[in-house]
Image (cartoon, coloured by chain):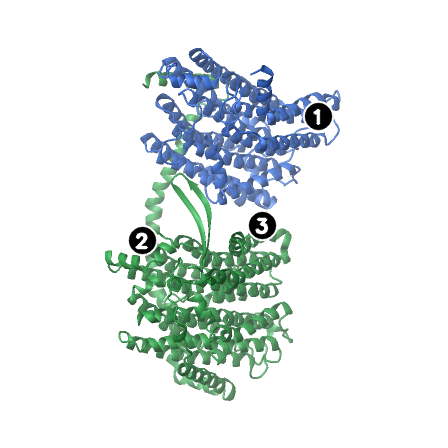
Chain colours: A green, B blue
C-alpha cells in the first residue's frame, strides 16, 4: 500500500467522525432531523474499516520485512505509522499536529470504532422518539472523534487536549436529558470529579516538560537510558510524574476514590452508558498507564500504588454491586470493578522486570474483551429499559425470559462472559490477570503484597460471578412481572436494536477464544514501544489458574442461582442478619457522603469566603479597570463633530505634526 | 528595444487588468442603451451585469494564475511576487464584493456600479504593479474616482449625499498631500522610475537623510494614512460608513487598506535604496511616525468603538483599529530575527478581508433592500429569526476579535510575535499595545454576539432577499474557520510575496 494511501487511512479514522459531528450539528436540527444517524453511521463505519485496515494490513506489513529482533518494541521500530500535519510554521513558532499509530493504538482504535458503530446503530433505535435525536448523534460523533485522537496523539500535549475533549463530550452526553435534575447533576459530577484527575495529568505533563524538555512520546518514552538519566539527575521525579499521571488515569478510569462519578453517569441515555463504560472514556486511563509503561517501570512504588488502588477499587465496587437494585447500577459497579482488575495487572511490573510485558498485555487484553461484553450488557439493559417503559429497578420486573427472548440470551452471553465462564471472552482475560498476579506473588521483593492482591482479585472474581448472575436471575427468571409503565405487552427490541446485540454477543462469546489462547493479541500488542516481547516458548497457558477461576466463576453463579432462584428467601434473611454490612453495601460504602463531608463541604466553605473576596475586592478592581477605556473614550469623541472642515483641519495638523517629527527626530 | 516591443511586453504583464478594464468599457458603453430615459430597466438586469462582472473576474483570475512572475522591473510595470499576492486579493475579494452588490443596486444603475467596482480593483492592481511614481498615483486615483461614483449611486437620501461629499472632499485633500510628497521625491531623485530611484539612492546619489526627503516621506505616509483610516486621518470613516450602503461600506473597509499598504510597501523601501522589501525595515523618522500612528490608531479606534450604537459606525471604528494592528506589522518591518512583520501584515490583511467582508455580507443578507440593518439593536433576536446568519456572523465577529478557533486569532498572534520577537523596545511597546487593544475590542465584539443571542427581537422579521450576499457571507465564515485549521498556505504565500 502506498505511503499516501496509508496516510489517508490514518487521517480518515479521526476525520470521518469529526466531519459527521460538524454536519450533524449544523444540518441536524433543520434538515436531517430523524435521519441524523446517517452521517454518524457512515462516518463510524469508515473509521472502523480504516482501523481494521490499519490493524490488519498496514502495521503488519510494516513489520513483516525481516524484523530485526533487537528493534522490535522500540518506538523507532517498524510497526509505527506516523503522519504529521504542519499546522503553523511562522518565524520561530512551529506547531504541528502529529498522529502516531502503533500496535496499542491500532487495537484501541479498532475496539473504539467497532463498539461505537454498534452502539450508534442501537442508539438510533433506542432514541428514535427523542426530540434531541440530532444532538445525540452529533455528540456521539464528537465523542468518538475525541477518543480516536486521544489514542492517536503523538505527544502528551495533544493527548491532553483530547483528554479534555473526551471529558467535555461525556458531560454533554451524560447530561443529555438536561431537563432532568438528576442527569444535570450527574453530568456536573462527572465533569468535576474528572477535573481532579485532570489536575494530576497536567501536573504530570508539566513535570515531563521541565525534566525532559519535550512532550513527544518518542523523546520521552522510547529511550530508557534517558529516563534513567533524568531519574539520576533528579531523584524521585519519575515517581512523582507517575503518580501524577496515575491520578489522571484514576479520574478518567474511575478508580477509588474518584470512582463516584461513573455509577451516576448512567443518568444519560443507555447507549451513552455503553459508550462510556466500554469504548470511549474509561479505557483512556488504562491506555495512558499502559502507554507510559517505560516511565512506570522506573517507579516501582507507583506501580505498587496502581495495583493497590486497582485492588481496592475492584473489591469495593464488587461489594457495592451485591446489593444494588438498579440493573444499570449493577453494571456500572461491575465496570468500576473490572477497571480495578486492569489496574491490578498493570502494576505487576513492580514484582520483576520480566513481568512488565505480560502485565501490560493482561491489562490491555481485559480492556479489549471487556469492551465487547460490557457494551453488550449495557445495550441489553437498555433494551430491557426500553421494553419496561424506562423502569430499571429489578424489584419491579422479573421473568422477562419469554417476553424478551433476544435480549435474554444476549444478556446471558454477556453476563457469562463477565462472570468468567470458561471459554467466553472474560474468562481468558481475567485468567491472564490472575496468572500474572499469581506469578508476581512468587517474586522475592513484593511477593506478600502481590499475594494479597491476588487473593483480593480471586475473591472479587467470585463476587463478580455472583452479582452478575444475581442481576440476570432477578431480571430474566422467576415469575413473569411487568411494571405498569411497560403496558401489558412489553415489546422486544426492534431489529435495529437486536442486530447490534447479536453481533456483540458473538464477539463476547468468541473473541477471547480467538485471540487469547492463540497469543495473537499478546504478540501483536508487544510490538508497542516500551514493551519487550516475551519469547514465544515462555508463553503458555496457566492450567492451574484456569481451573481455579473456572471453579470460582461457577461457584459464584451457583450461589446466585441458589439465592435468587432455588430459595429466594435466603438473601432477605442474610440481609437482616447482617444489617450493618448490608446497609454499607447498599449505601455504596457511603463514599459519596464521606467525600462530601471531607472534601466538598470544606471546599464550599472556602468558596464562600472566596466569593466575598471576589465580589468585594477583585470585582471592584476589575470593574474600575473596565471603566477606564469608556471614560477615556470621551476625550477623542469630542473631535468627531461631523464637520468636514474640522476633519480636514485635523488631517492637516497630522501632516504638519509628522513633518515636524521627521525634521526633529534625527 | 523598439517601442512596439516594449509596449507589447509591458502589456503582457497586465493581462488581468486589461480584461477587467475591457469589461468596464463594455459596461459603461452598453448600459445607456439598456436603460430608459427615466432610469428604468428590465427587471433582473442587475443579475446579468453581476454575472458578467463575475465572469470577467474569473477570466482575470485565470490570467492571474498563468501570469509570469519576474523580479526585475520592466518599464512602467513590475510583476513580482508581491503583485501576484495583491492581484490574488483583489480578484478573490472582488468576487465577494460583486456578490454583495448583487441585489443592493437597482437594475438601472447596476452596470455603472459593477463597472466602478471592477475599475477600483484594477486600480488596486496598478498600484502594486507600477514601477513609477506617476503610475502609483494614477492607480490611487483609479481607486478613488470610481469610489466617489459608487458611493453616490442609488437612492439619494441626505445621509448618503453627505457621506459621499465628505468622502470626496477629504479624499481629494489626501490625494493632494500624496501627490505633493511624490513630487518632492521626483525633485530630489530626478526621475519617477522606482527602480532608478532605488538605484540612485543605493549609490548615494540621493541623500536619504536630506531634510526634504524626510518631509516627502512624512507627507506620503500622511496622505496614504487616509486610505488606511489611520488616526488622525480617520475622521471620515464613521460618517461615511454610516451613510452609504452596506455593500459600499464593505468595499471601503477593505480595498482602500490594500491600496494604502501596497503603495506604502512600494514607496518606503525604494526611498532607502531597496527594490524589494525582504530586507527592509523602517528606520529612524519613518519608524517613529509609523509607530506613533499605529499606537494612536489602535487605541483611538477601539476606545471610540466602545460607545457606538450604530452598527456601521461601530464597524468603521473597528476597521480603524484593525488598520492600527496592521500598521504594527509595517512599523516592525522585516527585522533580521524572528517573524517577518510585513508577512504578518499581509497575512492579517487577507484574513481581515475575509472576516470584515463576510460580516458586511451577512449584515446585508440579514436585512433586505427595503429595511437594511443599521443599528446594533436591529440585530437583537437574530439567533431565533435567522439562526444560520447569526451563527455565521458570530464566526466572523469572533474572528475579528481575535479569538480561536478562527484565522483572526492566528493573524493577531503572528503580528504579536513579529513585534515581540523583533527585540527593540518600541517593538515590545507595539506588541503590548496590540494585546491590550485586543482585550478592549473583545468588549464590543462580544456585545454584538450577546445582542444576537440573548436579546429578544423588537421587530417582526422579514425574509431576506439577499441570497448572493448570504452565499458570500457563508463562504467568508467558512474561510474564517478554515484559515484556523489550515493557515500555512496563506502564510507561505505572504512570505513569498516579500521576494
Q: Residue at x 53, y 42 (%)?
A: B394
Q: Is residue A379 left or right of residue A521?
A: right
Q: Chain of mark 1?
A: B
Alpha-carbon span between mark 1 and mark 2: 71 Å
Q: Position of residue B44 (x, y in %)?
A: 72, 32
Labels 1 and 2 in the same subunit: no
Q: Is residue A163 left or right of residue A617?
A: right
Residue B108 is tagged as: 1
- The answer to whether residue B340 shows anywhere in this view is yes
Front label number (1 vs 2) = 2
Q: Chain of mark 3?
A: A
Residue A332 in the image: above or below residue B143? below
Q: Quadrant of the N terminus of chain A?
A: bottom right
Q: Tell me the residue that label 3 is attached to.
A: A26
Q: Position of residue A31 (x, y in %)?
A: 64, 52
Q: Tell me the residue that label 2 is attached to.
A: A212
Out of B312 and A330, give the one closest to the viewer: A330
Residue A325 in the image: above or below residue A283? below
Out of A529 and A574, give the one closest to the viewer: A529
Q: Residues within 10 Å of mark 1 (few under 14, many from 20)?
A: many
Snapshot quadrant of residue B121: top right
Residue A107 in the image: above or below residue B279? below
Q: Quadrant of the C terminus of chain A?
A: top left
Amino acid at each position: 500500500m502506498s505511503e499516501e494511501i496509508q496516510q489517508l487511512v490514518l487521517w480518515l479514522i479521526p476525520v470521518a467522525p469529526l466531519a459527521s459531528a460538524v454536519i450533524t450539528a449544523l444540518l441536524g436540527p433543520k434538515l436531517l432531523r430523524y435521519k441524523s444517524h446517517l452521517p454518524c453511521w457512515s462516518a463510524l463505519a469508515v473509521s472502523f474499516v480504516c482501523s481494521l485496515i490499519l490493524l490488519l494490513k498496514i502495521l503488519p506489513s510494516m513489520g513483516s520485512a525481516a524484523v530485526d529482533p533487537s528493534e522490535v518494541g522500540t518506538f523507532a521500530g517498524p510497526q509505527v505509522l506516523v503522519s504529521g500535519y504542519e499546522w503553523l510554521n511562522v518565524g520561530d513558532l512551529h506547531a504541528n499536529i502529529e498522529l502516531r499509530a502503533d500496535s496499542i493504538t491500532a487495537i484501541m482504535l479498532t475496539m473504539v470504532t467497532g463498539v461505537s458503530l454498534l452502539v450508534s446503530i442501537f442508539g438510533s433505535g433506542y432514541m428514535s422518539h427523542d426530540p434531541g435525536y440530532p444532538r445525540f448523534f452529533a455528540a456521539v460523533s464528537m465523542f468518538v472523534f475525541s477518543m480516536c485522537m486521544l489514542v492517536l496523539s503523538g505527544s502528551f500535549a495533544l493527548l491532553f487536549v483530547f483528554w479534555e475533549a473526551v471529558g467535555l463530550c461525556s458531560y454533554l452526553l451524560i447530561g443529555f436529558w438536561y431537563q432532568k435534575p438528576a442527569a444535570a447533576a450527574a453530568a456536573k459530577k462527572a465533569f468535576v470529579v474528572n477535573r481532579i484527575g485532570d489536575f494530576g495529568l497536567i501536573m504530570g505533563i508539566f513535570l515531563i516538560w521541565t525534566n525532559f524538555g519535550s512532550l513527544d512520546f518518542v523523546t520521552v518514552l522510547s529511550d530508557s537510558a534517558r529516563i534513567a538519566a533524568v531519574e539520576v539527575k533528579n531523584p524521585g521525579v519519575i515517581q512523582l510524574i507517575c503518580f501524577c499521571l496515575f491520578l489522571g488515569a484514576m479520574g478518567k478510569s474511575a478508580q477509588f476514590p474518584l470512582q463516584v462519578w461513573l455509577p451516576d453517569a448512567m443518568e444519560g441515555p443507555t447507549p451513552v452508558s455503553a459508550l462510556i463504560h466500554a469504548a470511549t472514556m474509561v479505557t483512556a486511563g488504562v491506555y495512558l498507564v499502559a502507554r507510559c509503561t517505560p516511565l512506570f517501570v522506573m517507579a516501582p512504588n507507583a506501580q505498587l500504588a496502581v495495583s493497590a488502588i486497582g485492588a481496592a477499587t475492584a473489591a469495593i465496587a464488587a461489594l457495592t454491586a451485591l446489593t444494588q437494585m438498579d440493573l444499570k447500577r449493577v453494571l456500572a459497579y461491575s465496570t468500576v470493578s473490572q477497571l480495578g482488575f486492569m489496574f491490578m495487572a498493570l502494576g505487576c511490573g513492580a514484582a520483576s522486570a520480566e513481568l512488565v510485558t505480560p502485565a501490560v498485555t493482561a491489562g490491555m487484553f481485559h480492556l479489549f474483551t471487556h469492551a465487547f461484553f460490557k457494551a453488550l450488557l449495557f445495550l441489553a439493559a437498555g433494551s430491557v429499559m426500553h421494553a419496561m417503559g424506562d423502569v430499571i429497578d429489578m424489584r419491579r420486573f422479573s421473568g422477562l425470559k419469554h417476553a424478551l427472548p433476544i435480549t435474554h440470551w444476549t444478556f446471558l452471553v454477556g453476563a457469562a462472559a463477565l462472570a468468567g465462564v470458561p471459554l467466553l471472552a472474560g474468562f481468558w482475560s481475567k485468567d491472564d490477570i490472575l496468572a500474572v498476579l499469581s506469578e508476581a506473588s512468587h517474586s522475592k521483593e513484593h511477593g506478600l503484597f502481590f499475594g494479597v492482591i491476588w487473593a483480593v482479585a480471586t475473591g472479587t472474581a467470585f463476587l463478580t460471578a455472583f452479582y452478575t448472575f444475581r442481576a440476570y436471575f432477578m431480571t430474566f427468571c422467576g415469575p413473569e412481572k411487568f411494571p405498569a409503565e411497560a403496558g401489558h405487552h412489553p415489546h422486544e427490541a426492534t431489529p435495529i436494536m437486536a442486530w447490534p446485540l447479536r453481533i456483540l454477543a458473538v464477539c463476547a462469546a468468541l473473541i477471547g477464544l480467538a485471540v487469547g489462547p492463540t497469543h495473537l493479541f499478546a504478540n501483536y500488542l508487544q510490538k508497542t514501544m516500551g514493551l519487550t516481547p516475551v519469547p514465544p516458548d515462555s508463553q503458555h497457558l496457566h492450567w492451574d489458574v484456569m481451573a481455579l477461576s473456572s471453579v470460582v466463576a461457577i461457584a459464584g453463579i451457583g450461589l446466585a442461582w441458589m439465592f435468587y432462584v432455588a430459595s429466594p428467601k435466603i438473601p432477605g434473611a442474610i440481609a437482616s442478619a447482617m444489617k450493618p454490612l448490608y446497609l454499607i453495601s447498599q449505601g455504596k460504602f457511603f463514599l459519596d457522603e464521606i467525600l462530601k463531608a471531607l472534601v466538598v463541604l470544606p471546599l464550599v466553605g472556602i468558596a464562600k469566603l472566596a466569593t466575598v473576596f471576589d465580589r468585594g475586592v477583585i470585582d471592584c478592581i476589575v470593574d474600575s479597570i473596565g471603566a477606564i477605556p469608556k471614560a477615556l473614550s470621551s476625550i477623542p469623541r469630542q473631535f468627531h463633530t461631523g464637520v468636514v472642515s474640522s476633519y480636514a483641519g485635523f488631517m492637516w495638523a497630522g501632516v504638519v505634526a509628522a513633518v515636524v517629527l521627521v525634521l526633529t527626530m534625527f | 528595444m523598439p517601442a512596439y516591443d516594449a509596449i507589447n511586453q509591458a502589456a503582457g504583464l497586465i493581462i488581468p487588468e486589461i480584461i477587467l478594464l475591457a469589461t468596464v468599457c463594455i459596461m459603461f458603453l452598453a448600459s445607456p442603451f439598456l436603460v430608459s430615459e427615466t432610469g428604468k430597466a428590465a427587471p433582473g438586469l442587475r443579475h446579468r451585469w453581476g454575472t458578467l462582472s463575475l465572469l470577467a473576474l474569473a477570466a482575470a483570475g485565470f490570467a492571474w494564475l498563468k501570469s509570469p512572475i519576474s523580479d526585475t522591473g520592466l518599464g512602467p510595470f513590475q510583476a513580482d511576487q508581491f503583485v501576484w499576492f495583491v492581484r490574488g486579493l483583489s480578484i478573490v475579494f472582488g468576487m465577494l464584493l460583486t456578490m454583495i452588490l448583487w441585489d443592493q443596486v437597482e437594475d438601472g444603475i447596476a452596470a455603472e456600479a459593477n463597472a466602478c467596482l471592477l475599475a477600483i480593483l484594477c486600480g488596486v492592481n496598478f498600484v502594486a504593479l507600477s514601477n513609477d511614481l506617476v503610475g502609483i498615483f494614477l492607480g490611487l486615483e483609479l481607486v478613488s474616482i470610481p469610489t466617489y461614483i459608487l458611493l453616490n449611486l442609488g437612492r439619494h437620501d441626505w445621509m448618503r449625499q453627505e457621506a459621499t461629499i465628505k468622502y470626496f472632499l477629504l479624499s481629494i485633500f489626501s490625494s493632494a498631500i500624496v501627490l505633493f510628497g511624490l513630487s518632492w521625491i521626483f525633485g530630489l531623485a530626478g526621475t519617477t522610475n522606482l527602480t532608478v530611484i532605488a538605484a540612485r539612492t543605493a549609490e548615494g546619489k540621493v541623500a536619504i537623510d536630506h531634510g526634504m526627503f524626510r518631509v516627502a516621506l512624512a507627507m506620503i505616509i500622511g496622505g496614504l494614512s487616509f486610505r488606511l483610516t489611520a488616526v488622525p486621518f480617520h475622521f471620515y470613516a464613521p460618517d461615511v460608513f454610516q451613510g452609504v450602503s452596506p455593500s459600499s461600506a464593505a468595499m471601503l473597509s477593505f480595498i482602500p487598506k490594500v491600496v494604502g499598504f501596497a503603495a506604502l510597501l512600494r514607496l518606503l523601501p525604494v526611498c532607502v535604496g531597496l527594490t524589494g522589501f525582504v530586507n527592509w525595515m523602517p528606520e529612524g523618522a519613518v519608524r517613529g511616525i509609523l509607530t506613533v500612528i499605529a499606537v494612536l490608531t489602535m487605541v483611538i479606534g477601539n476606545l471610540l468603538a466602545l460607545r457606538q450604537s450604530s452598527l456601521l459606525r461601530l464597524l468603521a471604528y473597528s476597521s480603524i483599529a484593525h488598520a492600527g494592528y496592521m500598521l504594527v506589522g509595517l512599523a516592525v518591518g522585516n527585522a533580521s530575527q524572528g517573524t517577518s512583520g510585513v508577512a504578518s501584515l499581509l497575512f492579517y490583511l487577507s484574513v481581515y478581508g475575509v472576516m470584515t467582508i463576510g460580516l458586511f455580507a451577512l449584515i446585508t443578507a440579514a436585512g433586505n433592500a427595503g429595511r437594511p440593518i443599521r443599528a446594533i439593536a436591529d440585530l437583537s433576536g437574530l439567533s431565533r429569526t435567522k439562526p444560520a446568519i447569526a451563527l455565521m456572523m458570530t464566526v466572523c465577529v469572533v474572528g475579528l476579535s481575535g479569538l480561536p478557533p478562527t484565522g483572526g486569532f492566528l493573524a493577531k498572534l503572528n503580528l504579536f510575535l513579529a513585534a515581540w520577537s523583533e527585540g527593540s523596545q518600541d517593538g515590545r511597546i507595539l506588541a503590548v499595545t496590540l494585546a491590550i487593544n485586543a482585550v478592549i475590542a473583545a468588549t464590543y465584539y462580544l456585545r454584538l454576539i450577546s445582542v444576537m443571542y440573548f436579546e429578544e427581537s423588537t421587530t417582526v422579521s422579514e425574509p431576506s432577499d439577499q441570497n448572493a450576499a448570504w452565499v458570500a457571507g457563508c463562504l467568508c465564515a467558512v474561510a474564517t474557520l478554515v484559515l484556523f485549521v489550515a493557515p500555512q498556505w496563506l502564510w507561505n504565500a505572504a512570505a513569498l510575496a516579500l521576494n
